[in-house]
Amino acid sequence: FSYNGGSTWSTDFQIISHTPGSRDGMPSVAILRDGSLLAVFEGWWDGIAGKFTVNCRRSFDQGRTWVNPQIIHSSPGRKNSGAPFVASLSDGRVVAVFMTDEDSATQNWPNYASVKIVIGTVNGNSISWDNLQTVSPASSWWPSVFDSPRSRSLMVSYLYPPG
């Protein structure tokens, strides 16, 4: 973290745990309305090695410590969810976009993935996630999300093959 516009940087803080047997990665961080930090990331947190889930951790002390991980989305069976991106909305909610192959008859991750979004409602120290929606069908990859409070709009970008 930098507290002076990037002139100096703090020592590293570990956000994702690298628990033995997991493959955590692709973190994205947002500042919530209450000032806490929310990190979303993909990892093998569902007890099945090789199956990616979308997870989050929250920090209430500017990233020095993080609460235990929470699964945001776990696709059924051996289907995957990954490559998440998070944004904090001006109304206090939070959104996470990610790609998943859960709607595909073919399991060939990350091919045949669609892009989905889920909305989180912050309730004190917890976040409840619901309202899962498909943004783009297969094949769509590597999403990101941006909130524009002035125009009251939300933009999701992703890679979609030409054709």
Image (cartoon, rainbow, N blue to C red):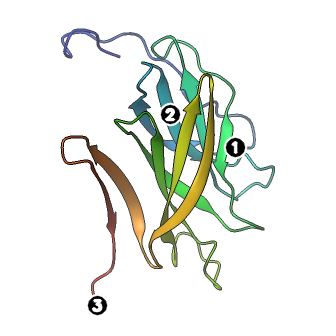
Judging depth in this view, the residue of 102 and 17 nearest the camera is: 102
Quote the CA–CA distance across marks 1 and 3: 36 Å
Secondary element at tag 3: loop
Along the polypeptide, which appears first: circle 2 or circle 3? Answer: 2
Callout 3 crowding tier (Cα within 10 Å): few <14, some 14–19, many ≥20: few
Left or right: 160 as drawn, with respect to 115 = left
Secondary element at tag 1: loop
Circle 3 residue: 163
Along the polypeptide, which appears first: circle 2 or circle 1? Answer: 1
Residue 3 position (above or below residue 94): above
Q: Amino acid at mark 3?
A: Gly
Secondary element at tag 2: strand
- Tell me if label 1 and label 3 are in contact, CB under 8 Å: no
Callout 2 crowding tier (Cα within 10 Å): few <14, some 14–19, many ≥20: many
Circle 2 residue: 39
Callout 1 crowding tier (Cα within 10 Å): few <14, some 14–19, many ≥20: some
Q: Amino acid at mark 1?
A: Ser
Q: Residue at x 19, y 15 (%)?
A: 5
Q: Amino acid at mark 2?
A: Ala
Q: Residue at x 32, y 80 (%)?
A: 161
Query: Which is closer to the viewer, label 1 or label 3?
Result: 3
Circle 1 residue: 22
Judging depth in this view, the residue of 76 and 89 nearest the camera is: 89
Q: Residue furthest bottom?
A: 163
Quote the CA–CA distance across marks 2 and 3: 35 Å
Q: Residue at x 36, y 53 (%)?
A: 144
Left or right: 81 as drawn, with respect to 2 = right
Query: Which is closer to the viewer, label 2 or label 1?
Result: 2
Quote the CA–CA distance across marks 2 and 1: 17 Å
* Coordinates of residue 80 in the picture (x, y in percent): 64, 63
> Which numbered tag is attached to residue 8?
none
* Coordinates of residue 123 in the picture (x, y in percent): 60, 29
